Image (cartoon, grey):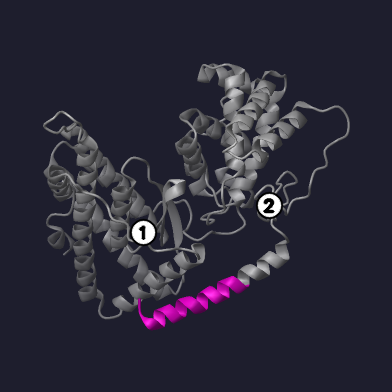
Amino acid sequence: MGKRNQERRRAKKKQRDARQRARAEQEGAFDAASGFGGCDCGDPFCGVGGGASVPRPRGPRTVADLLDEAMDEVCAIPPADTARREAALGRAAALFTKAGMGRAVLAAGSEVLHAVWHRGWQPADMVRAARRELKARHGRLAADLIAAEQRAYPTPSTGLDGRWAAQLATLSAEVWWGDDDAYLAGAAAREKCQPTVLGRAWVELLDLLSGLPEIPQLMPPPCEAGSGTAPGGSGVEAPVLAKVRGLLAKAESTEFPEEAEALTAKAQQLMAQHSINAALLDAEQDTRQVPGGVRVGVDTPYEEPKVHLLQAVAEANRCRTVWSRNLGFSTVVGFASDARAVELLYTSLLVQAQSALHAAGSRTYRDGASRTRSYRQSFLTAYATRIAQRLSRATEQATKAAGEDHGPGLLPVLASRAEAVDDQVDEWFAELSYNRSQTHARDREGWAHGTVAANRAQLHGQADALR
């Protein structure tokens, strides 16, 4: 990084710190008990600092009161204190045999979820966290909770962000039950478990959600739908991305490597050309679009080679990635269509790699011990390395060809967009640390097969295709 660039970054960091201090003074002290930030949405049930507090009515304790007290007890016990925590979870789970608990838990969960959205989380992120940290059952309950909470917000036709609505559709977050009082019985039947077992899962889920950290806000939460366009654009997919999606779907489904190669090459060609055309159009119209972000799940096992594959695709498409290892995702930062194209291409490449791994089967040493894990780790590492080389070369060729068509004015435009992406990363990830992690590839056969798979998946003849 050049000296002038470092000075510019330091100056921008000082400005961000000053803005953050000013916001903190305006919003008041952070509520350490709940971990919620400020919210100006006006929802009285928000519980995020900006909404008005709702006093608890006097009189006999309701099931909602009992649930609140039980959750307070569970959340106050450190995870390391397993004995006390197990006892508290058992007492909370026993409450789920009481009448009216279905409505109470959905209402309590909606309040927690409303705060989670204001800490930057999205529906897909939240369900992923529930499945990753707990179990698949918790992920299904999380989808139920999202469906119940979304009833209070606008429909897509009246202002809900299209990207948010698309996540709801992907998660099948729909109200499948009738009256909320009947929810627990229906959920217990679906999960094939007793009410107390379901109750424990619910308490574990609410405890998890209450402790989720604050992350960058990539799109407006549903209570702010219609308040303005967030960075990254709307949920309307550009026509070129629809074509890319179709090409990659065919590449994944074909049994012929040469056909998959040609289809993927054409998809990368369209993405590269669209990115350059969009940059030139923005410069010509002086629209000054702001980069946005997309979160991409990075699941176990073999996270590091998967992250390197995603990084390779992102860099080839003028984006940057930040891996949140403990949260199970990477954030792709870039202009709207570029970031979505990265997500599409990465997903397709990973599907192709996993298909090749499945076809390769397991591996053993001569003594019969398994070396499947070492083989697959090496395979994916080689795959990501080779893809990075080929995509980098393809991007250079595309830029050179476009420069010949558009003249010397192209490079300053692309440099300006790259700087905007860097600035957005600095703003969202002020405490970002850079660590060149080393991936392990100890299996010679896995490395060789991964390289071959990458060659088949990507970009033969790309230079000719781009011209």
Local packing at callout 2 (Cα closer than 10 Å; few below 14, some 14-19, many 20+) is few
Tag in front: 1 or 2: 2
Where residue 389 sits: x, y (%)? 19, 59
Q: Toward the viewer: 234 or 149?
A: 149
Question: Residue drawn at (52%, 57%), measured in percent from left and top?
Answer: 216
Residue drawn at (67%, 70%) of the image: 22
Q: Is residue 424 left or right of residue 401?
A: right
Residue stretch rendered in magenta on the structure: 1-18
- Kind of residue at disc 2: Ala
Judged from the image, the secondary structure of the residue bearing numbered disc 2 is: loop
Q: Can residue 321 be seen in this view?
A: yes
Q: Residue at coordinates 34% horizontally, 54% vertically from top-left?
A: 341
- Specify few, some or many for label 1: CA neighbours under 10 Å numbering under 14, 14-19, or 20 or more: many
Identify residue for label 1.
Answer: 338
Horizontal side of 282 relative to 205 (left or right) equals: left
Question: What's the amino acid at mark 1?
Answer: Asp
Is 269 located above or below residue 53 in the figure? below
Relative image position of residue 163 (x, y in whole percent): 48, 48
Residue 16 sits inside the magenta stretch: yes
Q: Mark 2 points at which residue?
A: 32
Type of secondary structure dominating the magenta stretch: helix
Going by the picture, which residue comes out furthest to the bottom? 4
Q: Taking 352 as reference, is 197 left or right?
A: right
Which residue is at 55% across, 30% downward? 141
